[in-house]
Amino acid sequence: MAIWSTEAASGELTIKIQGRFDFSAHQEFRDAYEKVSDNLKGYVVDMKETTYLDSSALGMLLLLRDHAGGDNSRIEIVNCNPDVKKILTISNFEQLFTIR
Amino acid sequence: MNPQECHIDLVALQDLKDIMESEFETLIDTFINDSNKKIEELSLNYLNQNSEELRKSAHSLKGSSSNVCAIKLSELAKQIEHRARQQELAGIDALIQALDIEFQIVAQQLSDQLIKK
Amino acid sequence: MSTGAPPHLDGIDGEEVLRVLIADDNDSDRLILQTIVRKEGHTVFTARDGQEAIALFREHSPDIVLLDALMPNVDGFEAARTIKQLAGDNLVPILFLTSLRDAASLADCLAAGGLDFLSKPYNRIILHAKIKAYAAMRRLHETVQQQRDEIALHNDRLIHEQEVAKQVFDNIAHPGCSSASNIKYLLSPMAVFNGDLILAARKPSGGMCVFLGDFTGHGLPAAIGAMPVSEIFYGMTQKGFSLQDIMLEINKKLKLILPVGVFCCACMIDMSFRKRSAEVWIGGLPDVLVYRANSRQVESLASQHLPLGVVDNSRFNIESREVPMQRGDKILLWSDGIIEALNAQGEMFGEERIIDVITQTENSERIFSNIERAVEQHTGRLEQDDDYTMLEITMVREDEIAVQEGKPGVSSIVGGPRDWSLVYELRALSLKEFNPLPVITHMLMEVPGLRPYSGKLYTILSELYSNALEHGVLGLGSEVKASADGFARYYEQRTAKLEQLSSGFVRFHFDHRPRADGGSLKIMVEDTGPGFDYQSKQLAEHQTETYSGRGIPLIKSMCQSVRYTGEGNQVEVIFNWHADI
């Protein structure tokens, strides 16, 4: 598991998660969005290389959403593989995030 | 330093003196008394041809004489210990004799150190 | 045995003061060693042989032991073995004083428990270094031991606390009536600490509600949420609240108490045996399966909603699905544990395998156990090793399941007023500043079995009350509302007239009578307004503005009858209800 984040000039933070996204990623994932500038316009969580996510990962996404302003947040979750997508769908996270 | 010519490592002995301070005299007295007994034991063990006991007394004397910097004495004890371990008691009487003579010299030199002090 | 005393640091150069046992039969050697060690600032105990050394060790339990190997009576090897035994778990470094050189003798020293050697002639610097190193090792060992003991103690306490907590959780989050013959379930005994929860309760109407929840996380944080969920579920189910009301209440509570990122994936099923249907709400759990006994086919119900505790009630969706069910049909549900159970190759068990097992099982009674067995075979482990949570509920005839608390159906509805009447008159001052509907609804809900109708009754009462107040007492015409800006104008007028109100009343007459399968509630509302020409309105077949403006069609759809009497300022509705909706 590894997490990178890159801040684009447009003010958008992209967080990439490689491998299993589970509780062991807790601190790293938080660091990815907490240790960057405050005035971000939006977030992209890139799951292209994410193989699996568990319910604590869903919790972490909710924490990010909370950090990004809750209902006013702009978060896109992109490039999900079918397994990951299924988990997000079961929890109906498309109601809270833009899933592409 | 050549143990054949030198009986006591005087440099080391000075160190020991510094450490022991007032106890130095007691140490020397103890060593001489103790060694007298050990050499007696040693001779007896030889007479009895008891190589195991002979080895032990020689071993003990080797250690204690080394501690008082009597290097030649320690070396002789070591040779006796070695032979006793190999159970080669033949000709060991010469070594014991040499050891006895060496001990007299060491005892004298150590006592001289006390007077010097 | 640890002395517990902190290391004494007043020695030379602020180093730790140790208690050192020296055993050597050679007087001069012992004297030298003792002097050197004392000069290092340590406390020394001396022995002439192994026996004395053991005695001194027992008496003083020193920190470090320096033993000559060859001594009379008890030699150094034996003394070392005894001392090691006496020291038990504590590390007491034993250093052999020896001029032994042969490997076999050195090996004997180590075998007897010695950690190192000091050879003659003694060298102060080496002696100092070794004592220091072994004292440090001893301290390290002590620290590790202390930590080990603390951890063990802590662990014992934690286990005890968990046991107590588990009792509390088990009492509150008990599986209710899940021993009923139409329910099968699998729940690890420590499930509450895995965040899994199964609740089941009979409804006053004879139906049954089941709840399967899966909290994120493990341990106490996952268990805490189970308590309010359970309390709300049992409290409200027993009182006959609807599935929607219960889910709203649970969601509200969880959103309030759970930190962001912790939530509960759940499914609740409200099963009505008489109506042969199940109402199902799923939020965040894997697909719930409906097994059809006739066709042996399986239908999937996918999760439609967010898990509980994620959004507040204003965004929370309580829409449920009505699933018609025949006798023998089953609903099967689980937390993700079973779906995600891995085999040796790291492959998940998955939904397809479950469906295969179900459709290939001839005897539907074996479906549940066959799934269990298939998971066992898949993982190669015994079921009880894992924390799988699974539930099966079967549609049966109500009389086929054991009676749990009281008798199901009508006769279980006891303990409240069923045969009564009441008049409740609200006069001007009350009409101005008091909304009587909550208190009236609350009173009506005391009628055993009527609770599920609270929503309908509230709608009926509020329509009747606003008609009586606004069109009756205040004399507002509903025509106003028809125009574009009418609504606003209507409510301006309403506020103004209400402020000026000094006389008039709205009077409720309630009359409730029990019936074989429920009851009949008559509500008559009269007001001091002039009334209206209800006869011509009725003839016009509900077509006119006024009539529909008064919300009568809505009421008519919910009631047995709606009848205007008197001058049109009295309306009477009959609401017949059945215990099982």
Image (cartoon, helix red, strand yellow):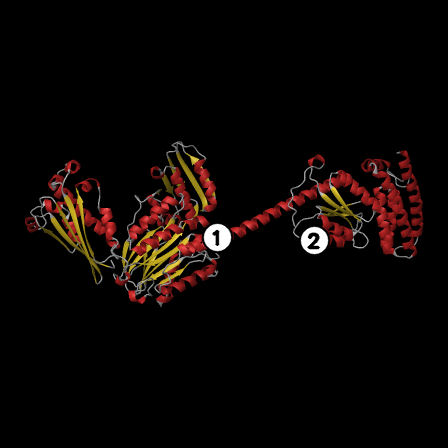
| Residue A68: numbered disc | none
Q: Which chain is mark 1 on?
A: C
Say few, some or many: other residues with alpha carbon within 10 Å of mark 1 (under 14 / 14 to 19 / 20 or more). some
| Residue C86: numbered disc | 2
What is the three-letter code of the residue carrying label 2? Leu
Q: Are marks 2 and 1 on the same chain?
A: yes
Q: Could you say where residue C285 lies in the image, as x and y percent from the top left?
A: 36, 52
One can see residue B63 in this view = no
Q: Residue at x 90, y 34 (%)?
A: B116
Q: Is residue A60 above or below residue B90?
A: above
Q: Secondary structure at mark 1?
A: helix
Which residue bears the numbered disc 1?
Answer: C162
Q: Is residue B30 left or right of residue C125?
A: right
Q: Which chain is mark 2 on?
A: C
Q: Is residue C435 above or below residue C400?
A: above
Q: Is residue C96 left or right of residue C402?
A: right
Q: Nearer the viewer, residue C60 or C153?
A: C60
Q: Residue at x 21, y 63 (%)?
A: C516
Q: Is residue B18 left or right of residue C263?
A: right
What is the three-letter code of the residue carrying label 1? Gln
Q: Single out the residue that lies furthest toward the bottom.
A: C363
Q: Could you say where residue C251 lies in the image, as x and y percent from the top left?
A: 34, 47
What separation in Å lies between label 2 and label 1 (alpha carbons)? 36 Å
Mark 2 or mark 1: which comes first in sequence? 2
* Number of marks: 2
Q: Is residue C161 above or below residue B116?
A: below
Q: Secondary structure at mark 2?
A: helix
Residue C501 figure quarter = top left
